[in-house]
Amino acid sequence: MSYHVKARKVKKIDTKFIFISGGVISSVGKGITAASIAMMLESRGYKVAPVKMDAYLNVDAGTIRPQEHGEVFVTKDGVETDQDVGNYERFMNTDLSSSNYLTNGQIYKTLIEKERNFEFEGEDVEIVPHVPEEIIRRLEKAAMERKADFVIAEIGGTVGEYQNILFVEANRIMKYRDKRDVIHIHVGYLPTPPHVGEMKSKPVQTSIRLLNGSGIQPDFLICRSEKAIDDRRKETLAWICNMNADHIIAAPNLDTIYRVPTEFERQGLADKILENFSIKPKKRDLNKWKKMLDKIGKLKKEVDIAVVGKYYETGAYKLSDVYISVVEAIKHASWANGVKVNLNWVSSIDVEKKGAKEILSGFDGIVVPGGFGSRGTEGMVQTIQYARENKVPYLGLCYGMQMATIEFARNVAKLKNANTTEVDDDTPHPVIHIMPDQEKKLLNREYGATMRLGAWDCVIARGTKTEKAYLEAGLIKKTGAPKISERHRHRYEFNNSFKKQLQDAGLVIAGTTPDGQLVEIVELPDHPYFVGSQFHPEFQSRPLSPHPLFVGFIQAVVKLKTAPEKISQQKILELSY
Ligand code: GLN
């Protein structure tokens, strides 16, 4: 008996599947393409379930070095996923979950567990068909969970790699079974080498040949390039790659990634996709999105923000992908405040080498994002001291909140050598220490998915800058419990045995867990804006709903920047958020 007959006994769902692959280079824009298509279809009233399929054997992204993987994006239900899931959430303006992310690690783990439980009842378990079948099962599950009309399955990596071949095979099998319900979109890069001065399509032709060799004929081709692909090259590609020239879509560089959906709309991509599935075009509602884009196009004033982190270097290059949600959240908040933003990547190790003043003077605001381990932490502390003393608006995210607590403890509360036990086990003043349940997990070497993860409630203290920010965003009210929910990813926490001492020295605890046990937000009152959160607000920032803590931060930045040049310390405080 052939296995596929058995596997397709029932067709449980009536969902269309759109596979997206990338070619020529990695980071070609598959994620933004997938997010844009998801958003365009949802703007027509359809439900879309995007799924990022990563080829690594790690069960999730939580255990991969940031330089290697980029940002670990955390979903509401606490899964440590790929940064593309963040792109989907930002474009779709929705919360996604564990079913929107899968890895080869998860697939193999499930199959091996099933085999050990005798669920295959003596069957010989093979890479093919069992791996692609498990991939298909998960894609169908994602469809059912979101009651989706469309699943967008983004194949991580580039075609031609051994690693992701079984995702492509899952696509082939699905297409073989349900020809009308499955399409494939290839995103390829068309370079214009400076010494030639002409756009080259050969690498894309080769990547489509690779797909053909795996039994896939793409239905659409998205051409990533500096300038839009011209008709001549479209015709060549159509002829060589067996494609409808009308299905070859330009994806030139744009001033912001958020313009990609409207650029695709201009070329009729969403309606063409519907037509390909024999679905009639449907009216879309992109009004809010377009208003936001209009606003971005008119911005004149600029602010300069330094993001002081430790994961920037990769060989001779700097990598801002590690903080992609932070970067996007700063942009969203800047646009909401009517300014453009220049983001500057500062390595905290450089601050250690050259001094905070030397590196940081001139910036309008400073952000210290999340991080792990001891390297570069002294540079973060020096950065925060500089921001506090010079009244430069400061936002600390997770490690940035912990480092702010350490800086305050050392330099204001005079607790010499205060530190986190993550960096110094023997510190005389462990103002940040490991959470008790986390200690056990580390002792047992249980590293995977064991941090304090996902969304947790937090109660905000009235009369704080934090309260003002959430009130202005309409996320809490003046009456009732000022409760918010934010996403976390950490093992260490504020040490409550230092709470009184630090509060007496002037630190404000602006938010805690509802039981009051975990400190979630600290801030300083005598400063234009100095806020640190144990959670990661950046994960919930969207272009259509920027995050209040970032909005408050940029608002303070703008107020100070537009103030007369020489202002007194008193005036700075009057201008504070
Ligand atoms: N390393 C710190 C902790 O584990 C902070 C984590 C983070 O910044 N995400 O608590």
Image: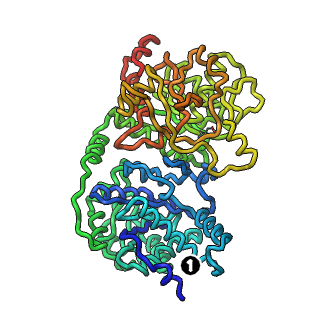
Residue type beneath disc 1: Pro
572 or 228: nearer the viewer: 572
Q: Is residue 311 above or below residue 405?
A: below
Query: Where the C terminus falls, by quadrant?
Result: top left
User: How crowded is the residue under tag 1: few (<14 C-alpha within 10 Å), some, or many (20+)?
Assistant: some
Q: Which residue is mark 1?
A: 129
The reply, left or right, for residue 523 in relation to residue 371 is left
Residue 522 position (above or below residue 175): above
Q: Is residue 425 left or right of residue 508?
A: right
x and y, in percent, of residue 341 in the image:
41, 36
Q: Nearer the viewer, residue 227 or 392?
A: 392
Q: Residue furthest right?
A: 426
Q: How many marks?
A: 1
Q: Quadrant of the N terminus?
A: bottom right
For image coordinates 62% across by 76% down, the residue present is 120
Please state the horizontal and vertical placement of residue 225, each as a whole percent of the image.
Answer: 40, 60
Colour scheme shown: rainbow
Q: Does any portion of residue 273 appear in the rendered image?
A: yes
**Badge 1 element:** helix
